[in-house]
Image (cartoon, grey):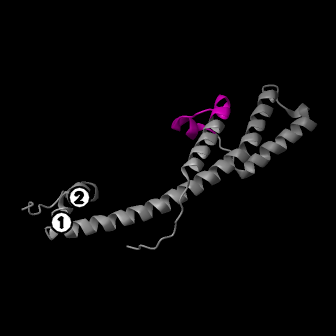
């Protein structure tokens, strides 16, 4: 188990609070325009990728220059609104994905280091409890419920 420290930062509470407030503001601003989908809805839809975004943009261009080829059953106004939503939200989505990825990586790294240190502390209390150190026993018994599925070992009672 490595104890190499790969991250050493302290994020001021006021920075966390401000970021949380701004993200909440973003969520509130966009809420009237966003749509949630069920898993089944998501599975049933055509998905746009890099190539299909370009296709939709090209169709938009042709629709403007050659509208005679639009089928009568195509709702041109709705197509243009949908394309505008994709064009408008994509840069925000990309930024949010980058932020989410960086947040996930940072939480994963800091969490790994915190868990590693916790396991070291647990190991130390386990060792002390096994040697009969009275103050270590209740700590070990408490922590053993979190670190071990086998249950706690019985150590000698305080004398």
Crowdedness near tag 2: few (<14), some (14–19) or many (≥20) residues, C-alpha within 10 Å: some
Instruction: Tell me: 11 left or right of 80.
Output: left
Quadrant where the C terminus sits is bottom left
Q: Is residue 81 above or below residue 144?
A: above
Measuring from the top left, give residue 56's x and y in whole percent: 78, 42
Q: Nearer the viewer, residue 100 or 118?
A: 118
> Which residue is under mark 2?
139
Q: Nearer the viewer, residue 125 or 34?
A: 125
Report whether residue 40 is seen: yes
User: Can you tell which quarter of the image residue 115 is in?
Assistant: bottom left
Q: State how many labels appear.
A: 2
Under circle 1, the secondary element is: helix
Q: Earlier in the sequence, mark 2 or mark 1?
A: 1
Residue lying at the far left of the rendered structure: 159
> Which residue is under mark 1?
129
Quadrant where the N terminus sits is bottom left
Report whether residue 34 is seen: no
Marks 2 and 1 sit apart, C-alpha to C-alpha, by 9 Å
Measuring from the top left, give residue 26's x and y in whole percent: 66, 38
User: Can you tell which quarter of the image residue 149 is in?
Assistant: bottom left
Measuring from the top left, give residue 84's x and y in whole percent: 78, 37
Residue at point 64% right, 48% down?
96
Residue 85 lies in the magenta stretch: no
Q: Main secondary structure of the magenta part?
A: helix
**Which stretch is magenta?**
28-45
Q: Is residue 151 above or below residue 24?
A: below
């Amino acid at each position: 188990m490595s104890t190499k420290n790969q991250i050493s930062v302290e994020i001021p509470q006021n920075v966390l609070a401000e970021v949380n407030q701004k993200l909440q503001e973003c969520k509130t601003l966009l809420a009237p325009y966003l749509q949630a989908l069920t898993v089944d809805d998501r599975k049933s839809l055509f998905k746009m990728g890099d190539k299909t975004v370009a296709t939709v943009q090209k169709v938009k261009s042709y629709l403007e220059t050659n509208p005679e080829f639009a089928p009568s059953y195509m709702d041109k106004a709705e197509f243009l609104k949908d394309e505008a939503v994709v064009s408008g939200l994509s840069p925000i989505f990309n930024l949010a994905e980058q932020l989410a990825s960086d947040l996930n990586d940072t939480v994963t790294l800091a969490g790994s280091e915190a868990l590693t240190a916790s396991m070291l502390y647990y190991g130390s209390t386990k060792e002390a409890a096994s040697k009969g150190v009275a103050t270590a026993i209740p700590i070990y018994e408490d922590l053993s419920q979190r670190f071990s599925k086998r249950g706690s070992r019985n150590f000698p009672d305080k004398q």
